[in-house]
Amino acid sequence: KIRQALRRLAREQPGAEVALVGCLSQLRPEALKDFPNVRWVLGSDTKFELPEAVESGEPTLEVDPQVRQFHSPLVGDFSPRTRAFLKIQDGCRFRCSYCTVPLARGGSRSAPPDLVLRQFDQLAEAGYREIVLTGVDIGSYGLDLEPRRSLVSRLVARGGDVRLRLSSVEPTELTDELVEVVASNPGVCRHWHVPLQSGSDRVLNRMRRPYTRARFTERVLRAVEPFARVGLGSDVIVGFPGETEEDLRETLAVVRELPFTYVHVFPYSPRPGTAAYTLTDDVPRAVKVERSKRVRELVAEKRAAFLRSLEGSTAEVLVEGRRRGGFWSGLSSEYVRVYLRSPLDLTNRLVRVRLGRPYQDGVLGDLLEPTGEHARAAKKNVAIEI
């Protein structure tokens, strides 16, 4: 995709000068510098030096092979979004055999707690009603701090009307302490995303994943147990080198057994520089496609059953905006897309909704009795065209 974009830029804007920054530049700087119009190549640790490089006017190939610093992006304007993303961590302490992230982003590094709290406050003051904690491996936050700092409980304590959502958490980091913090705080979304990758212990071992199928299952069931209803997502890689039909059946069994509400399925793709890249027993592409299809079909069945089970229940929905057809659309705490109609402007509002039948990629909903400013607007007949 990068190569295609560079060639397109060269055709459309032949006089433009191009800077390449970030992970790909970190991994393969020499391979990038000779592409059309590329003048600056900066890696993960040097990318924030881009303004100085451009100002100097001199070509730059500056990549430190060791990524050590934590770079926090400035708190920006996520408009027209209603959710903001707050980076709390970078890099990864694991060394999975298929993954280039540790090579491109370095080891795990936590953002200073005071910085996170300050940026959280800035986003809340800017009006965002949901803040998503992001990073490569957010479950490792604080391991490199002395003393280790618990972050989620501190953010919840100052959240006010802002709800908090966690991005992906590794199964080994789904601790009883974290589960208790989430379960005891209504301001944290009822939503876990826990990567599985494979349900076969043999494949997990080859992937260098630090858990077994049994351990993954135990941790996930512990994490969902406190909740009457919870969104549970995961990631699965099919066609890893050496994966057999029996390995795939074990993955399907785990997906079938656990209460997943969605799963992202990826066919394995070799990455230069990783341990798995040297494995010679790759699975044929046609087999990867067929196995991906089987997992996705099972996931679709589970997803449909989950959405049907929601009918008649209530949920808190953060409305993002209007969609085609006159529907307002937003996400529930459980990461379910909800479509509803209302004469009121619901943008960036947390509202109570009675959920209905499945619709498109989510469910239909009816706005419950409006409260606060919505009720006042209704009494004044304030409405908008939809």
Image (tube, grey):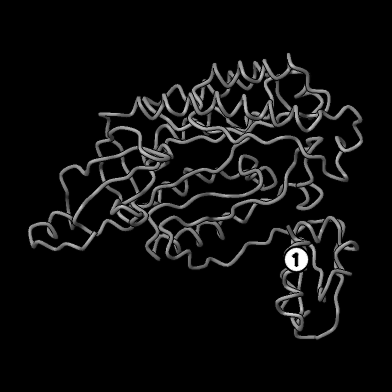
Q: Residue at x 50, y 50 (%)?
A: 132
Q: Where the N terminus falls, by quadrant?
A: bottom right
Position of the C terminus by quadrant: bottom left
Q: Residue 12: where, in percent of width, then height?
A: 70, 76
In percent of the image, x 81 and y 76: which residue is there?
A: 37
Task: Give percent across and percent down for residue 306.
Answer: 41, 26
Residue to which mark 1 is pinned: 21
- Residue 324 place in picture, x, y as percent: 35, 54
Q: Is residue 323 left or right of residue 271?
A: left
Helix, strand or loop under label 1: strand
Q: Is residue 182 above or below residue 373?
A: above
Which amino acid type is marked by label 1? Val
- Few, some or many C-alpha atoms within 10 Å of disc 1 (few <14, some 14-19, many ≥20)? many
Nearest the viewer among 310 and 149 is 310
Indicate the position of residue 125 as horizontal and vertical percent values. 39, 64
- Count how many numbered circles sit on residues in the image: 1
Residue 74: quarter of image: bottom right
Q: Is residue 186 left or right of residue 105?
A: left
